[in-house]
Amino acid sequence: MLNGHGDDLHLVKGQIKYNFSSNVYYKGCPTAILKALAKQVEGIQNYPSPAAEELSECASIRYQQPAENFLFTNGAIEAFYLIAQLFRGKRSTIVGPTFSEYEDACKMHNISYTVVEKEKLDSFNTDLVFICNPNNPTGSVFSFAELEYFITENPTSTFVIDEAYIEFTKATKSVLPLVEKHKNLIVVRSLTKTFTIPGLRLGYIISDASMVEKLKAIRIPWSVNGLAIQTGKYLFENYDQLIFDIESLLKERIFFQDQLRVIDHIEVQETNTSYFLVKLLKGKASELKNVLISKGILIRDATNFTSLEGEFIRLSVQSPTANKQIIKALTSWI
């Protein structure tokens, strides 16, 4: 992690009451998950399975794909660095502005890369292509048809589709059904955002079995801890009962954005998710961040996203009370 991360809560402990900097579901981890996790604490006395194979079996049942197509990782971040390690020294296209860890992983493993805006994509002539769908931080999406076309027409490029936020949108759908047809597709997902468990670090790769075997060969054993494995099993067994209502979340986001749009000197950007960018027409994002921290509010300074020109912050819809507080703070700051 060379360029930093959006959620800086650990740096301002005790100061923050309202955290808009993280894109996880704002109502927090469901109580049922916390209770299930508590029952597994004694398990830390034992070694977990080295490759979390039991989670692959659970995911196989949910997604109706062979267990051999899954590889569970220490968050989605480990997945990106494993992929970059496998393609060390190659060339990559990153569709931006987007999540900085793709760039960081490429730098670490000597992959030359070009960041290309979605609107300027015309062809792919690189070994790897990183696409975040829905995109972080913009909330924009590629359609299923667009991605299928890219993957089909460019068989010599391996497409890494980051679907960490796929359950935060209704504007597109997952490319998981394409995995068994295309060996040049790697889908990366995370349980972190949907179930608000970033501290457990639990992500996964879905790809052709031969690709998964190559990635397994270079990963360290026990990268997924025992508590994460047991919690993951519980999540997959109770997925539909635990997941949030996306329709309600998107309605809350629309209402929040409408309230923000009446504030002078900011431009609220369009999105297909619960998070979005806000462009500052005056002042610096770094200054605003510090002012809001003093008021107990944490935002994401988005100015370090490559190819994002101007002063931007990223917000994610929170509780009605929290939303009112940041609207009040932004109005007084402007």
Image: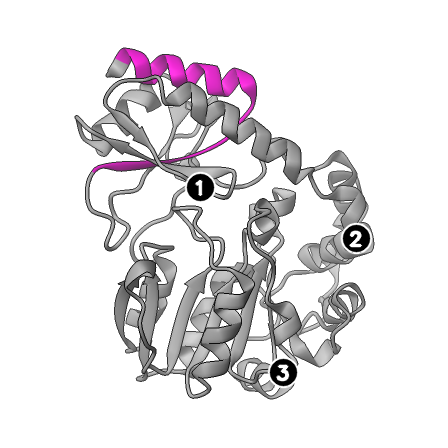
Task: Residue type at mark 2: give it.
Answer: Tyr
Question: Which callout, 2 or 1, points to the residue nearer the camera?
Answer: 1
- Relative height, residue 257 to residue 154 (above, below): above
The residue located at (73%, 40%) in the rendering is 34
N-terminal label among 2 and 3: 3
- The answer to whether residue 30 is magenta is no
- Relative height, residue 7 to residue 58 (above, below): above
Q: Looking at the rendering, which quadrant does residue 227 occupy?
A: bottom right
Question: Which callout, 2 or 3, points to the residue nearer the camera?
Answer: 3
Categorize mark 2 by other alpha carbons within 10 Å: few (<14), some (14-19), many (20+). Answer: some
Give the labeled residue for mark 2: 234
N-terminal label among 1 and 3: 3
Give the labeled residue for mark 1: 271
The residue located at (78%, 65%) in the rendering is 58
Q: Are marks 2 and 3 in contact (CB under 8 Å)?
A: no
Categorize mark 3 by other alpha carbons within 10 Å: few (<14), some (14-19), many (20+). Answer: few
